[in-house]
Image (cartoon, grey):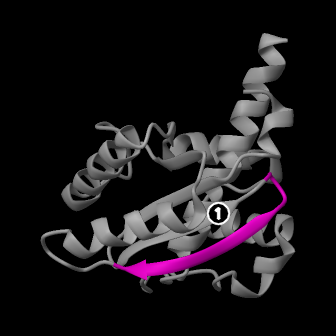
Amino acid sequence: MTSSNHSKETVLGIHFNKIGFGYAVFEGISLPVDWHIKRAEDRHDGSFGKQIFELLDRYDPTVIVIRKCLRKEPWPCSDRTKRRTKKLEAIARRRKLPVFTYSRLDIRKCFSRYGATNKDEIARAIGELVPELQHRVPPMRRLWENESYLMGLFDAIALILTFYWSERLNQQHLS
């Protein structure tokens, strides 16, 4: 994959959270196509699978980007997130779609170039990088507050931007 191919790719980023998942679709590093938060509270993940198939059919992505669930991470994935991650990977395999995974540490490393070291700062950096989303950046969370439901959206976009930056860096090292 060369960086020139990135402009022709449709990248779907999905981030699972307790209310469902946030997703974003980009056709190039600076071209967001769509973004949204989906509720998927079905205990048996039936609605989740249907929603994923609808996204794949609507946007026909060439790449899927999701969070890597590491065992020894300060922010472990829930059992439901692990289940949904495996289900999404299986769906992608059947459709022969490449899946890239990045840990929260990978994301933080990528956004450190903007001085962003936590989720709130990363969301603000995304708001500056993607002006269409500036008005959606949630206010900084106080310790006693729950995370904004919009954060799932910014987590999905952070995954996509990490993909673009990581793949571009990998291509530069191969050249």
Picture layout, residue 28 above or below residue 41: above
Residue 62 image position (x, y, % from top left):
60, 45
Residue situated in front as seen by the camera: 95 or 30: 95
Picture layout, residue 133 above or below residue 32: below
Residue situated in front as seen by the camera: 60 or 85: 60
Q: Quadrant of residue 150?
A: bottom right
**SS under mark 1:** strand
Q: Which residue is mark 1?
A: 25
Report the magenta stretch's main SS: strand
Horizontal side of 6 relative to 73 (left or right) equals: right
Which residue is at 44% across, 86% downward?
Answer: 145
Residue 92 image position (x, y, % from top left):
40, 45
User: Which quarter of the figure is the C terminus placed in?
Assistant: top right
Horizontal side of 67 relative to 119 (left or right) equals: left
Taking the image as drawn, is residue 119 in sight? no
Q: Quadrant of residue 165?
A: top right
Per the image, is 8 magenta? no
Picture layout, residue 172 above or below residue 53: above
Which residue is at 53% across, 48% downward?
Answer: 64
Q: Which stretch appears magenta?
A: 28-39
Task: Tell me the crowding category of disc 1: few under 14, some 14 to 19, or many 20 or more residues within 10 angstroms, Cα based.
Answer: many
Which residue is at 27% across, 51% downward?
Answer: 87
Which residue is at 56% across, 78% downward?
Answer: 36
Q: Amino acid at mark 1?
A: Val
Residue 6 image position (x, y, % from top left):
78, 41
